[in-house]
Structures are given as structure tokens and as C-alpha cells.
Image: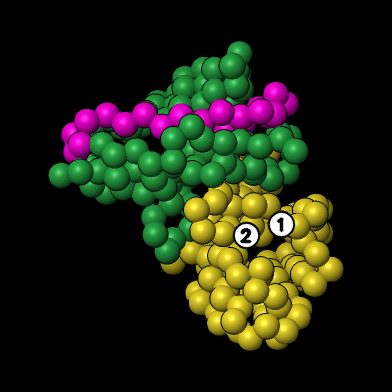
């Protein structure tokens, strides 16, 4: 079936540097994309979302980019902090109902 | 705390036993979702409710699994005759009725079947 996946399973980044997490999706009918952060032992936490009619959206220290032509989604974290260490998932939603399809996750490790 | 609440946080059970998990969504949220997550993987959709109506069930939801939301508020997920393959984190999420609205997740119930 349709799936959402990630290129890199683990990303190690120096504190203060920027992080970029990538995600490829295959369902061309998807029109809503979300990034979640999950810390150990906790549920996924919403970071930022973007609709298919946009190609960029910014939040606090985070930017999501959407390239529908190549079905690619990325999350940029500026000035990465130790508290950003977690597993990050991209997820997509095709239509009504908000059922989400998640990718496999990328672990971000922030080095002091 | 006004977030999504799940109980219990951890459950260890013997193979063949039945287990039931509870989820209390955010009070004004009409939609409630159940997901299952295994180690290193993203959550997988199981089922969702709008108010008390169960609107969609995944193929992952075998006949040993049943979910209810009798009054459109809290929900329960029951697994009958548990198998070792049922060991996972079971996550509940809720959202408003409008599409594309943010889904808030609970902390999950970690099930271990021994």
C-alpha cells in the first residue's frame, strides 16, 4: 500500500548546528503532512504541519518544506538543542478522517 | 491535565489472556484514534471513532481486537487471547471534527505478552 518513509535512520548533529530530516512519500493523493517528535517512553508530539497547497511553512526554530513534484518532505531545525534529541516521524493524511500514515522515523542525536 | 490520557501505562500479560486499555481524549475532541507502534517503527493506524461511531478499521485489527466508544467520550481497546505478536505500544489520539486538525497523542500503553 501507500507508505511514507525516511532516508536516514539516525542523524547526529552538533549542538547549535542546523538539522535537516528528510522524508519521501508515495501517495500522490496525500494533501496534508505532519512532523511529529517522539521522546523515549512518550507519545508523538506535534511539531508542524503543511498542506499540499503550500511548499514551505515556518514555526519556532522549525521549517517544513514540501516538494510535491518529487514527493519529498523535509524538516529543518535551526540551532539544534539537546532537547531536540528524539525520534522524528513524518506522517501524511490523504482525505477526510485524519487517519495518519507514518514513516519509520529518524533518530536525532545532539552532541554537546 | 487536559491532554489525552491512557491507562494503564504498562501491562504485562500471559499469552492467551484478555487485556483492555482505556483512553480518555481531550474533552472537546470528537475524533478518537487507536494506533499500534512497535520498536523503531512509526505508529500504525488501527481504528477511529467520530463520537460513538466507529468509522474505519484497519486490516491490522483482527477479530481478536475490539474497540468501543459507547458514549462518545472515553474509548476502550480490548485484545482477546493475546499473542506474543501483540506486544507493542498502543497509542490513542484525539482531534477535532474538522479535517486536517492536529491530532494529540497520549503517552501510550505498553503491552508485553509473555
Residue found at x 57% / y 36%: A5
Which percent across, then down, holds residue A21? Answer: 41, 32
| Residue located beneath label 1 in the image | B46
| Callout 2: SS | strand
Report the residue that reaches farthest toward the top.
Answer: A69
Q: Which chain is green?
A: A
| Residue located beneath label 2 in the image | B36
Q: Is residue B31 found inside the magenta-colored segment of the image?
A: no
Which percent across, then down, holds residue A26? Answer: 66, 28
Q: What is the quadrant of the C terminus of chain A in the image?
A: top left
- Pointers 1 and 2 in contact (C-beta within 8 Å): yes
Which labelled disc corresponds to residue B4? Answer: none
Most foreground residue, B15 or B61: B15
Q: Is residue A20 found inside the magenta-colored segment of the image?
A: yes
Tell me which chain the residue with mark 2 is part of.
B
Other residues around mark 2 within 10 Å, as few (<14) / some (14–19) / many (≥20): many
Residue found at x 27% / y 29%: A18
For marks 1 and 2 on the same chain, the one whose residue lies earlier in the sequence: 2
Q: How far is disc 1 from disc 2 in space, using C-alphas?
A: 7 Å
Task: Using residue A108 as the reference point, say whether residue A51 is left or right of it.
Answer: right
Residue found at x 50% / y 53%: B40
| Callout 1: SS | strand
Which percent across, then down, holds residue B101? Answer: 60, 41
Q: Which chain is yellow?
A: B
User: Which portion, as a residue range, is magenta?
Assistant: A14-33
> Which image quadrant is residue A110 in?
top left
Q: What is the quadrant of the N terminus of chain A in the image?
A: top right
Tell me which chain the residue with mark 1 is part of.
B
> Which image quadrant is residue B26 in?
bottom right
Most foreground residue, A11 or B71: A11
Which percent across, then down, holds residue A95? Answer: 73, 35
Amino acid at each position: 500500500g501507500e507508505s511514507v518513509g525516511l532516508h536516514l535512520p539516525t542523524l547526529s548533529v552538533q549542538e547549535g548546528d542546523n538539522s535537516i530530516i528528510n522524508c519521501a512519500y508515495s501517495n500522490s493523493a496525500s494533501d496534508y503532512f505532519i512532523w511529529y517528535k517522539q521522546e523515549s517512553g512518550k507519545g508523538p508530539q506535534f511539531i508542524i504541519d503543511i498542506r499540499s497547497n503550500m511548499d514551505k511553512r515556518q514555526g519556532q526554530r522549525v521549517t517544513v518544506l514540501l516538494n510535491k513534484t518529487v514527493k519529498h518532505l523535509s524538516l529543518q531545525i535551526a540551532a539544534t538543542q539537546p532537547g531536540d534529541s528524539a525520534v522524528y516521524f513524518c506522517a501524511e493524511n490523504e482525505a477526510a478522517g485524519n487517519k495518519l500514515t507514518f514513516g519509520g522515523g529518524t533518530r536525532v542525536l545532539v552532541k554537546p | 491535565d487536559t491532554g489525552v490520557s491512557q491507562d494503564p501505562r504498562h501491562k504485562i500479560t500471559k499469552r492467551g489472556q484478555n487485556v483492555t486499555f482505556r483512553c480518555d481524549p481531550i474533552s472537546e475532541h470528537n475524533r478518537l484514534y487507536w494506533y499500534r507502534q512497535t520498536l523503531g517503527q512509526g505508529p500504525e493506524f488501527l481504528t477511529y471513532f467520530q463520537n460513538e461511531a466507529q468509522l474505519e478499521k484497519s486490516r491490522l485489527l483482527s477479530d481478536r481486537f475490539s474497540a468501543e466508544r459507547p458514549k462518545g467520550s472515553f474509548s476502550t481497546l480490548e485484545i482477546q487471547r493475546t499473542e506474543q505478536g501483540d506486544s507493542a505500544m498502543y497509542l490513542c489520539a484525539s482531534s477535532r471534527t474538522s479535517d486536517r486538525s492536529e491530532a494529540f497523542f497520549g503517552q501510550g500503553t505498553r503491552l508485553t505478552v509473555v
